[in-house]
Amino acid sequence: MTITAQFDGAARQFEIKRENVPFLEHSLGRSLYAVLRDFTEGRWTFVDTAAVISFALHGPSRDDKLAINLARQAARCGMPAEYASRYKPHPNVVAVLEREGHGNFAPLAADILTEAVFGVSTAPEAVNDAD
């Protein structure tokens, strides 16, 4: 499912692909469900907001994709899936959050996380790609 929302003056598509969840969880230092709980309990941070929105908008970088693939290969060989890097939010996302206030985007991040964790979104703009 993809969430469509206004960001930086335009309608944008946000989605966290399921195969990338372990890497994002590694980058955030906790499960997406724990991050979602922080958002719903009002304990979100700038770092979490930037990471979630950036990852859903831009996905992993080329270097991140390499780290994800290496970890998957290690797991297939019975080795621990260790990631060599952590996700760095896209500079434009950081700039928008700094300019417009990251709290304004906390509900969007919560919707993105809800979709990533449960496969549903509370956002009225959510589009189910399966339809």
Image (tube, grey):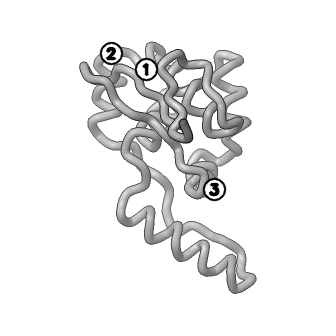
Q: Nearer the viewer, residue 3 or 79?
A: 3
How many numbered markers are drawn?
3
Identity, as a three-letter code, of the amino acid under mark 3: Pro
Q: Which mark is residue 22?
A: 3
**CA distance separating discs 2 and 3:** 29 Å
Q: Look at mark 2 in the image and give the residue it sits on.
A: 100
Q: Residues within 10 Å of mark 3 (few under 14, many from 20)?
A: some
Mark nearest the camera among 1 and 3 is 3
Residue 5 on image: x %, y % = 40, 22
At 29% across and 40% down in the image, what residue appears? 91
At 33% across and 23% down in the image, what residue appears? 7
Q: Quadrant of residue 33?
A: top right
Q: Nearer the viewer, residue 3 or 112?
A: 3
Asked whether disc 2 touches disc 3, contact meaning CB atoms under 8 Å apart, the reply is no
Residue 62 on image: x %, y % = 35, 64
At 49% across and 40% down in the image, what residue appears? 15
Q: Residues within 10 Å of mark 1 (few under 14, many from 20)?
A: many
User: For the residue labelled by badge 1, is the local secondary structure a helix, a strand or a loop?
Assistant: helix
At 49% across and 63% down in the image, what residue appears? 85
Q: Look at mark 1 in the image and give the residue it sits on.
A: 102
Q: Quadrant of residue 102?
A: top left
Residue 46 on image: x %, y % = 48, 28
User: For the residue labelled by badge 2, is the local secondary structure a helix, a strand or a loop?
Assistant: helix
